[in-house]
Image (cartoon, rainbow, N blue to C red):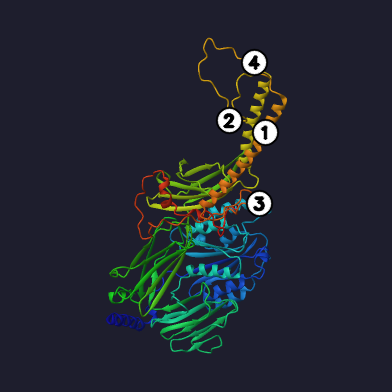
Amino acid sequence: MKTGCRAALLILGLVLLVPLSAQEPQTEQADIRLVVDISGSMKRTDPDNLRRPALSLLVRLLPPGARAGVWTFGQEVNALIPHREVDDRWKTGALERVGEINSVALYTHIGAALEGAAYDRAERSEGAAPRTDIILLTDGVVDVSPDPRISAREQQRVVNELVPQLHSLGYRIHTIGLSDETDEALLRDMARGSDGLFSKARNAEQLMDSLLQIFQQTVPAERLPITGGLFLIDDSIQEFTALVRKAPDQDATELTSPDGLRYHAASERPDLHWYGTPDYDLITVTDPSPGRWEINAQLQPHSRLTIISNLQLVVEPLVNNINVGEPIPVNFYLKDQRGIVSNPALLDLLTLTLELSGTVESELALKTWQGPPPEDGRYELVLPAPRRPGDYELRLTLDGKSFERLFTHRMTVASQFDVSLTKRLDGDNVHWDLMVDGKETINPGQTDVVVHIRHSGGHSEVLTLKAESPGIWRHTLSPEERANYRISLQASGQTVDGRAFEEHLPTQYFTYPEEGDPQPDPLGDAIGSLREELDDSVAAAERARQGQDSEPPPSTLTLGQPSVVDTEPAGPETATAEPREPTHPLLLAGSLVLANGLLLVLAYFGYRAIMGGRKTQVLDDTDDEPAPSDTGAPPPMQQLESELESPSDSPDTPAPTQPPPPKPASADEEESLFPLGDDQLFDDNSDDPNGR
C-alpha cells in the first residue's frame, strides 16, 4: 500500500512538472446558443422576469474559449447577444444585455427562432458538423397566426422537417417549458428528435435547476464529489469553482481550507473571487492548498464543484435519450499531459463506482470495477437496461486515495409502447377499451404483452393479449361488479435489431360505475325476478278459480304447502276427477297479501345478503383496507409506474439473447409477474395523466 501511494504521488508530481502549454488541446469546444421567448404571455408566466438572473448565472459559468450567443423571439427573432468566442469582454457585454429581456412580443414563432439560432446551417454538411447545443426557453406553443390551421401546419413543419434537419447537421435542441400551458408533448418531441433534454420549470428555483442540468451536459467540466460539505483538493488542481445553491434565509456561506483558514464573501484575497446573490454563491479559488476543504452552508440540489486540473477523468460521449431495454455502456479513462494513464501502480489504487438512479426509487443499478486494471487504461462498465421510462442520472465516482473525480450525466429513457384506456358506452353497458401500440423499434412478431386485471372485489386474472395487427394489442373489459379496477401490463420480446427487452408499462386504473354510467342494480333485479314469479302465480290462481287450468302453475315461489303428486299410473278403472270448487275471493285476496308480505321479507334479506356479502369480501381481500362504498364518490383515477420487479430479478443478470417462447400466464404465475398485494391496488399519491 505504501509503495502504491508513493507511485501515485510520483505521477502527480510528474504531472505538475509538465507546463500547461503541453496539455492536449480539447478536440471540441462547447457551442451554446440560448433562444428566449419574449412573447406577451411571459408577463403572466414569468412576472418577475426570472429569466434574467438564470441567464446571468449561465453567462458567468461559461468557460473561456467556448462559443455562445443569445437570441430572443416572439413574432420576430433578434440577436440579443452576439454569437462568438467567450472572453471577459463578451461576458461583460452579455451581462449588460441580459437586462433587456422583456415580455412585449406578439406570437410565439418557435420555428423561426430555431432557424435564427442555426444561422450557419447552410455551411454544414451532414455527419461532419461540430456539435452545437441550442437551449430553448418558452412558455407556449407554436403560434404564428390568428388562424389555428396555419399554426398547426407550422408545428408539423417544425417537428417533422426542421428538427430532423438540424439534428443531421449537428444541432441538439434542449427545451425548457416555463409554465403548465406549455405544449409539453411538442417540446419533448423536439428534444428527443435531436437527442436533447426536456425540462419543465414552474418557478425560479426550477428554472435555475433546469438550466444548470442542461448546461452541465452541454459544457462538461472536470468535477469533484462533495460529501457532507467536504471535498478533496489534490496537487494537480490549479483552480476550483464552487457553485453553492443556497436555502432561503440561510446563514452566510463560509469556506474552510485544510489549514483552518476561513473564506467568506468579504474576504479580500488575491486568490479568491466571490460573487453572491440571494440564490447562490459562485466562489473561485486559485492555487488552492491540497487537502480536505469544507463548505459551511446548507447545500441545495445542483450545487457543484468544478476544477482545472492536469489529471482529468475523460468519459466518452453518451447519448441523452435511449429506449427502455437498452443497456448503457460507459467508457472512460484518466488522462494527463502525456496521454492516457495506464500505469498499474496508480490504477491499482482506484476505486470506481458507477450508479444509475431514476424516477422510480427501486430503479437503481450499481457497478464497480472488479479485477486488475485494463492494460491500456481504458475502462468499460455496462449498466443493465432500465425497465421503466423516466429521467435517470448516471454518476461515476473515482477515488484514487490521494485524489477524487466525479462525472454525472442525465438521460431520458422512453417507453417503446403507448398505452391508452378509453371508456365506451353501449346502451346500458359500459366497456373499457385497452390498447397497446408498439413503436417502430420493436419486432411485433417476437413481442408479447401480458396483463393482470384485478379489482377491489377480489377478482384476479392474468392473460396474454392477442395482436390485432402487427404492433397493436387490444382488449375490452366490460365490468359488471361495483369496484375499483387495476390493469398491470408487462411487455417482453425483441427489438428490430435482435436485442431482447422487458418493459413494465404504465398501470391503468378505472372505477365502475363512474358518474353518468348506467348503474348496476342487483337488488332491483332480484325484486323484479320475484315480482314476475308472483305475477305468474297470481295469474295461475285466477285461472284455477275460473276453472281454466287443471294443473298447478309452474313456480319456484310456493305460497302454501307443496302438493302431493301421485306417481302411480292411472288405471282404466280410475274415476274421473270431479270439478274443483271455485276459489273464494277472500282466500285469493289473503293469498295476495301473504305473497306481497313474503316478497318484502325476501327483498329485505336479499338486500342484506347482497350488500353485506360484498362489503365483507372487499374488506377481506384488501387486507383490512377500507373499501370504497358502492354509492360513494370514486377515488381519483391514477396511472403509476408498474410493479416492482420480482425478487428473483437482478440488475446484474444479463438479458437473454433470445426471448422465451410465448405462453399464456397462469394464475400460479401472477405473483412472479406482478408481485403486489391487493393492498396496493390504489396509490393516492400518484398522478393520472389521463386526468381521471
The local secondary structure at tag 3 comes to helix
Task: Identify the residue at image location x=64%, y=15%.
Answer: 579
Q: In this rendered view, identify the residue nearer to me: 163 or 631.
A: 631
Q: Is residue 558 left or right of residue 352?
A: right
Res. 427 visible in picture: no
Q: CA distance from mark 1 to mark 3?
A: 71 Å
Residue type indicated by callout 1: Leu
Indicate which label's residue lies in the foreground, 3 or 2.
2
Q: CA distance from mark 3 to mark 2?
A: 67 Å
Q: As drawn, is 671 to the left or to the right of 197?
A: left
The amino acid sitting under disc 3 is: Pro
Q: Which label's residue is closer to the chain start, 2 or 1?
A: 2
Q: Amino acid at mark 4?
A: Pro
Secondary structure category for the residue under label 2 = loop
Three-letter residue code for mark 2 = Thr
Answer with left or right where residue 321 lies relative to residue 187: left
Counting residues from the start of the chain, the first of labels 3 and 2 encountered is 3
Q: Provide the residue designation for mark 2.
A: 556
Which disc is residue 317 wearing?
none
| Residue 687 seen anywhere in this rendered image of the structure | yes
Q: What residue is shown with label 1?
A: 594
| Residue 71 horizontal/vertical position (percent) | 59, 66
Q: CA distance from mark 4 to mark 3?
A: 87 Å
> In the figure, 201 relative to 509: above or below?
below
Residue named by callout 3: 148
Of badges 2 and 4, nearer the viewer stands: 4
Query: Which residue position holds label 4?
Result: 579
Q: Residues within 10 Å of mark 3 (few under 14, many from 20)?
A: few
Report the front residue among 337 and 588.
Answer: 588
Image height check: is 264 above or below 338?
below
